[in-house]
Amino acid sequence: MCDVIAQINGASRRSFLGAAGLASGATLVAALGASAASASTAPEPASNAAAQHFRTRLALLGTAAGRTFWGGSERQGISSAVVVGDAVYLVDCGDGWARRYLQAGLGERTEFHGLEQLEGVFVTHMHSDHLIDYPSLLIFGSTDGLAARQNPVEVIGPGSRGKLVPLSENAKSTPPVINPENPTPGIADMTEYLYQAYASDLNDNMRDSLKPDPHTLIHVNEITLPSGLVVDPDVDPAPPMEPFVVFEDDNVRVSATLVKHPPVFPAFGYRFDTADGSVVFSGDTAFSDNLIRLAQGADILVHEVIDPQWVESLFPSPPAPAQQAKIHHLINSHTSIEEVGDVAERAGVKTLVLSHLAPADNPKSRWAEAGRRFSGKLVVGEDLMQLGVGSRKR
Ligand SMILES: [Zn+2]
Ligand SMILES: [Zn+2]
């Protein structure tokens, strides 16, 4: 484990611009400024041409919560990117992120290319919908441009929870423990386990096709919480705290905070400050004062959202014990349509972008109800939507 910030001392730093104030009047817009985006979930990167005029931009890659195979939505799993000039910073690796990454024009879409500009990957938490396509980076990445980079890609994410999640009060029996010697691996151990799981392929390719060892291309860092912060994840996984810096280079300064996604710990929200403005990602969280603190005055807040009416509709009444446990998690660990506008209002952000949509196939009009409690711009996220940050390039 190591702290990334400690490794980049000496890197030149830009001055950072915060953004403040609310846009007047509640508005639902397709995209920020002139960077119009499609209302469809179908990939239409050409519709984001205007966003290319911004040096810094947000690219939504996948916008679905959870699994993506069901329902009528074509949304891919949760994944987003902040682009500063040519540099790309990925947030989460949900299903289909790599395909969307190239569809969004973030890399050259030809054989043996694609990820050359990927500088960092930020993982919010260890739930599988945020990591199910992480192996594409680890295993395919060397062929898709990582080998051409000067420096390894920095992966920044959670460490171990430290102890198993308590058993649900709805449990009828105690389940077996997967991997009992390390039942709650963080991102570093997960990475090594994935290399082990793909050892046949990796050893084959390193010996026969002379592909590089992925360890030399990808540098994994588990976030160390600020000293003095004591957390019992079973009691409160996100006690009040100040944001802290986890990464910094010439383009971005990335701060993190613990957010409230029980029983997950640690679960992070991230804030990217650039010379052009700021973009904040909630990760998965219930209403979180820490997140509101992190997002103060940001240009864009990308926030997860869940529709409680959908949760109610999922199971018969009364629900079975396992169903009740699932309902409890969905309601208590995510932010509802009614709450999310309030979060954005309290944070004073200019634009609220809804993503990690649960369910992925809700009508847009339902999500738009989040605007009732937010006086800024509301954007219902779509795969491949891009939003400019700050001013257009001159
Ligand atoms: Zn999720
Ligand atoms: Zn989650």
Image: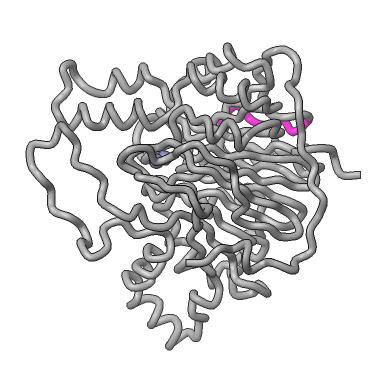
What is the x, y in percent for residue 87?
71, 57
Using residue 43 as the reference point, say whether residue 393 is left or right of it.
Answer: right
Q: Nearer the viewer, residue 300 or 118?
A: 300
Helix, strand or loop for the magenta stretch, by majority: loop
Residue located at (16% from left, 17% from top) = 318
Residue located at (60% from left, 59% from top) = 120
What is the x, y in percent for residue 214?
49, 75
Magenta stretch holds residue 110: no
> On screen, 2 above or below 21?
below
Q: Quadrant of residue 178?
A: bottom left
Q: Quadrant of residue 110?
A: bottom right
> On screen, 140 above or below 316?
below
Residue located at (63% from left, 34% from top) = 295
Using residue 309 as the reference point, say whether residue 363 is left or right of it.
Answer: right
Q: How is colour applied across the structure in the image?
A: one colour
Number of marks in picture: 0
Using residue 279 as the reference point, say whether residue 360 is left or right of it.
Answer: left
Residue located at (53% from left, 42% from top) = 269
Direction right: furthest residue: 394
Q: Quadrant of residue 381?
A: top right
Direction left: furthest residue: 173
Q: Nearer the viewer, residue 34 or 183?
A: 183
The quadrant of the rendered image in which ligand 1 is seen is: top left
Image quarter where the C terminus lies is top right
What is the x, y in percent for residue 117?
67, 62
Magenta stretch: give its range.
Answer: 34-40
Whether residue 129 is visible to the viewer of this picture, yes or no, is: yes
Whether residue 68 is visible to the viewer of this picture, yes or no, is: no
Using residue 248 as the reference point, say whether residue 169 is left or right of it.
Answer: left
What is the x, y in percent for residue 51?
75, 39
